[in-house]
Image (cartoon, grey):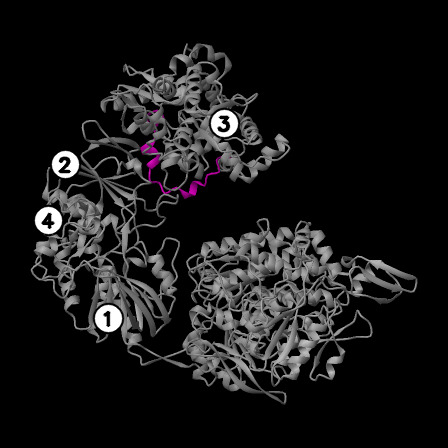
Amino acid sequence: MSINNEFRPKIVAFCCNWCSYAGADLAGSSRLAYPADVKIIRVPCSCRVNPMFILRAFEKGADGVILCGCHPGDCHYSTGNYYARRRMTLLFSMLDYMGVENGRTRVEWVSAAEGVKFSTTMNEFVEKIRSLGENVRLGDLRCKN
Amino acid sequence: MQELKNRAIELLENGTVARVLGWKIGENTYDPEPAFFDSVEAMKDFVYNNFCAANLSKYMIEASKLEGKTLVCLKPCDSYSFNQLVSDHRVDREKAYIIGVGCKGKLSIEQIKKSGVKGILSVTDSDPIQVETLYGNKELPYTAGMLSRCFSCKGKEHVVYDELIGESAETSTVDRFDEVRRIEAMTPEEKFAFFQAELSKCIRCNACRNVCPACNCRKCVFDGNKFDSAQKANVDSFEEKMFHIIRAFHVAGRCTDCGECSRVCPQGIPLHLFNRKFIKDINTLYGEYQAGADPEAKGPLTSFTTEDAEPSIVSKGGIV
Amino acid sequence: MKFSYYPGCTLRNKAKDLDAYARASAKALGFELEELQDWQCCGGVYPLGTDEIASKLSSVRALAQAKEKGQELVTLCSACHHVLKRVNDDMQNVEDIRTRANNYMKLDTPYGGETKVLHFLEVIRDRIGFDELKKKVVNPLTGKKIGAYYGCLLLRPGNIMAFDDPENPKMLEDFIRALGAEPVVYPYRNECCGGYISLKEPDMAKSMCQTICESANGFGAEMLITACPLCRYNLTKTQLDLPVYYFTELLAEALGVKEEALK
Amino acid sequence: MSHQNNQAEMIKEISGVNPYKCMKCGKCTATCPAFDEMDIKPHQFVSYVQSGNVQALAESKSLWKCLSCFACVERCPRDVQPGRIIDAARQIVVRQRGGNYLTADEIPALLDEELPQQLLVSAYRRYKR
Amino acid sequence: MQRIGVFVCHCGSNIAATVDVKKVVEMVLLEPGVVHAEDYQYMCSEAGQAKIGAAIADKKLTGIVVCSCSPRMHEATFRKCAERYGLNPYMVEIANIREHCSWIHKDMQEATEKAVILARAAIAKVNLNAPLQAGESRVTKRALVIGGGIAGIQTALDIADAGYEVDIVEKTPSIGGRMSQLDKTFPTLDCSACILTPKMVDAAGHPNINIYTYSEVEKVSGFVGDFTVDIRKKARSVDATKCTGCGVCQEKCPSKKTPSEFNRGLGNRSAIYTPFAQAIPNVPVIDREACLKFKTGKCGVCEKVCQAGAIDYAQQDEIITEKYGAIVVATGFDTIKLDQYDEYAYNQSKDVITSLELERIMNAAGPTKGHLERLSDGKAPKEIVFVQCVGSRCSDDRGKPYCSKICCMYTAKHAMLIRDKYPDVNVTVFYIDVRTPGKNFDEFYRRAVEEYGVNYIKGQVGKVAPQPDGSLLVQASDLLDNKQIKMKADMVVLATAIEPNQGVRNIATMLTASIDTNNFLTEAHPKLRPVESPTAGVFLSGVCQGPKDIPETVAQAGAAAVKVIGLLAKDKLTTNPCTAKPDELLCNGCGNCAKVCPYGAITYEVRQVNDHGIREDRRLANVNSALCQGCGACTVTCPSGAMDLQGFSNRQLIAEVDAICR
């Protein structure tokens, strides 16, 4: 999407219900702005995020995907984010191996108390995606319909 | 070969096994096919030569449902797959009588053709390989016909068997991760170009999926609508990429690196490069892990440590 | 043990003895100081402005030279130490400065703060050990009551200099103890001597040094030791008759190499 | 943007300090060894930058009295670093032509026998472009 | 196809000021499945809910999307509303257009576009929703309180009085906590022990309260209503059933050189000890690190002098496993270490002390028997300086960024008490701000200034320099007079920042309760659910949640107790129906899902299935929905997609992704 020739990326943020979604709520109630390009999807836990969701987002035109969960050790379900951490590490490494810019994917641990961190993270991520530009590399291979 | 055949007949006759899972002789030396033999009579077509590359472990899924034991011939690398299928609860160890067969590295007619030999009429599986062609006879060194996977063989020890027959010879000469490292060293543009070129060849025939012992789902997720993902029809090239990434991800931690995917790909796509990247990353980050070596082991994606690397390692120079 | 060594301008001139005693002592303690070639003045003060690059380049050059030799870089003068350590920290952590400095320098391999900067005292504490120093002392300075004067540059800012506790340091006290003398702890040992202010407002520096010396004296110090020529210069201008020595002089004395050093 | 605001922005940029972090506790002023010589006190530096009154800061006595001893920097609980602010103000002055606090011709009269090179070098750096 | 109604809330101007709600209504009506859309000022109000009800009836809605505040705020409200009007509550989805949209964006067009996209995602999701039925789980009618300070004691007493059993686990040898160390309390100046001790005695004697002192929580499993906890009862080396509390052992113990924790290290205690005279239980423990018998094998004096034969050197740690329905964290605080603040000479001079140390000095049972004296030379101080905000309100890495809240008041108390008892002593307080929000607080502080002559100076202390004559030179600023002050003092008292007790992070991890960067436990909602942790069944009492004084702590303790009682009063809890569910035709029975399940909710059984006419016995995963908490770890580990999560299914999440990326 682009308004006035300015590149507006599509960014999907998966947030776990207990920490990061609450962190995003806190960022909201503290009026800590971040760009509207970020759209949040609520999941119960970071371990609910299937690599297929991430690839699907790219398939459908996302320019960046970020996954936020509780800090390791603080998972509401004790261990979920540890599994998520391994899965995402391997997935991101594979995408990097295939030549996809590694800045398009990110995992950040944000607690319910870290509204500031949520906002800073999103600002940084959007900035990063804007600097990378449109997702051409995956875009070449995207659905044309 | 004869010893193996005799022993199989003996076990069929004395009722230890109800059938034999092995290879059936083809039209030529170089095209034996996996087959079940359920009688001594049928065993006349049984063959085991250096072209018997197929991994038979996956056939044991169906064999496990049948009455009685099945004699299965497993090469050293196949025995890892068999173990992994046991830990996936897809085959029943009790239903198998495993003869670990020797392996001196497997030959492939494609490989021989690739070495520039044309008009092949017949080949031997001997060392050196004798090739009869329209243009006369040729002699090729054994390694010229050997599958590339055999050059990075993980060893000639069987990890599971009831008895062993036949001799093996070490064939490993290169580090199996060298190819992965070569890609890792590329620029993102080069990597992308490389994979785009390879994957654009994919015709989505599913041969890789069908042969893969780790791809043992009753119904593949790509054939269902659980993810609302497209059916087999090759809708777009992104799908292709997604299919291969997800397939590699689904077998990550369970792939034994048997190399069947690349062997059977009619388009010659080096599919094992995906699996090996995952294996290499797993070894680097979570400690050496060989799927199938220990059927009791907890896989790297179903376990963790509190000190695991963060995904950001990928953007900080990658996993090397 | 071999280190790259950055003496600094004053040690070539007014404070030759600080340098000479250090070299002799190093030899006695079993390490070698290899002076960098063609080093340039560090500038004496760390440029605080975030946009000042040029004034940091001489330090970067010295640091890069040590890196090429694969050696840690040792300094003696507090000011040089302060400047080199902070510039090195910039090169490690401030991307903007690193990029711009490297653009100016055009080195074969860019410098990114790889060199470890050590003060001579840190070498003694962390590489030799005070116990080991104690063993090598041949003329213990028994009975001497010595006040350590740290000043500001060695200690602050604490998170970058990481030299010692900036408010309650003990490195020099341990050093004094190892030489067989008695350290006198007094609260102004980390307060400023006035530094460069003494050039244009000598009275200001004088009154500050007066406070420091009176405090040390009040707690029983018979002499002060310091690592910095400028501190020494300022501290000796008070009305008190409190002698101020370079720590290396006492070190050389205790190690029995003082005579030799001045040859 | 007015000249005043412009200069305040310059100070923020050169010093890398955010004056709004200050909570006016006065620990800098409590700790400053040059306090008696200063007309504008360390805790006031931030106010001058905040209000854009950099000119007053540039014309102050304090500008030349700071010792760069970093006591305020070390002890500031809010990481405001008043020492960096005053240094930035000094930079603005010395970078302007003729703003030097030290000129070459006045030096000989200031020298004595023992004076270390370091003192001259440091004073040059802090007082002069 | 669902028949979906979309309800866009203005939230007064919270949403409507930034999001064009009419436009959102207009846009969502174009979405497939949407048969109704409207906006309203306050959707959560009675009238707003009635609108939803009317639309359900009129338009025969099968699903609802509410575009409003965070689902963490009102999802439950709208689910109940749907249920009331005959719709399954799980047919409701929330599009968060307030916290995630209107509050963080300024541009109306941009915010409106985003709100529409968020609404589309929720619509896409609800299109795939299916009605779900909540299950039930049992409630163990017993509560655990971790920490035996005033917060824990009060919570336990309130729960016990309501008729439920409570266990208190306290890691030190006695309950009482920080309050037992205090001398007097503000703003009434009554004696801390006098008001605390009766409560300690009440707790000890309460038939419903069971106290484990010298014990720590070691392991927690389970979930709300049904926690299983392992408690390590450390070996006391004294048999509590035999000990009469006569105290002879402590008197005769030859090892008396261990710094007393209770007296903050200002005095010593014996190796066998009770922390203080009123300790509960009045049963000593042997500090094995200090005890000669344990260190050298020789001694055994206590065993010899104990008439009751209670000394038991062979005692071992004991693990007690108990079930609880609710857990209250009341782990309290400690003062920060002052190693980073040597400019105040805390480590250089014995006469620089913390306020908590001053409490012990002022206390009649303390190391100086209540006499105000310098610890260096025993002399009576004539000039005392108090320094406020030591380590509080610091944004550097040395201190804490928050206000410790209690220091202004206890400093006023100390100043007042000293001026009252020793009128010849000058007291100066250096402050940055004096913060006195609380009943009778400002009056109290003003009394210190106006009636007791305490000298308050606005300005921080920069350095405390011990002088050769034994005095302390305090260098400070007086911001109102624009002066630098250098004054001599005989004693300096530092109002040291407080921080959550060490070990609370470990407890939080065991409880999966979230914790902030300062190690304070996070509340479920900062305003509306201040005593609950976001983890169901875990409640917060006292300073573990944030700095508090005694009355606030007691109030919060009571509030936490009420929440616990409310929970324990139920026989059954409805469980979250968003649990994992396997598709038996797709399940491979591979066993990977069970490996990642943190609750052991997945088992396998061999069952006959009919797979499109083929009947065969298969090994299949089974989810125990009472145990499943719905994290979804299993769903991702399942390669065939057989395992799915109800309420957050693969297709629902993919639909959201598609809607956002459209």
Looking at the rendered structure, whether the residues under marks 4 and 2 are on a common chain is answered as: yes
Magenta span contains residue E112? no
Give me the C-alpha separation between circle 1 and circle 2.
47 Å
Q: Are the residues flagged by discs 3 and 4 from a single subunit?
A: no
Q: In which quarter of the image is residue A12?
A: bottom right
Same chain check for tags 3 and 2: no
**Residue that carries the numbered disc 4 in the rendered image:** E364
Q: What residue type is labelled 2?
A: Pro
Q: Which residues fall within the magenta stretch?
A: D14-38
Query: Does label 1 or label 2 sit earlier along the sequence?
Result: 1
Residue E126 or residue A85, whichever sits in front? A85
Q: How far apart are marks 3 and 2 (CA)?
A: 55 Å
Q: Give the mark nearest the N terminus, 4 or 2.
A: 4
Between discs 4 and 1, the one toward the N terminus: 1
Confirm or deny contact between disc 3 and disc 2 (CB under 8 A). Answer: no
Label 4 SS: loop
**Where's residue C231, x and y in %?**
38, 21
Subunit under mark 1: E
* Kind of residue sitting beneath label 1: Val
Query: Separation of disc 4 and disc 2 at Cα?
Result: 18 Å
User: To which residue does mark 3 refer?
Assistant: C2
Q: What element carries label 1?
A: strand
**Amino acid type of the residue that numbered disc 4 sits on in the rendered structure:** Ala
Q: Using the image as rendered, state which of residue E452 and residue C96 is in the foreground.
A: C96
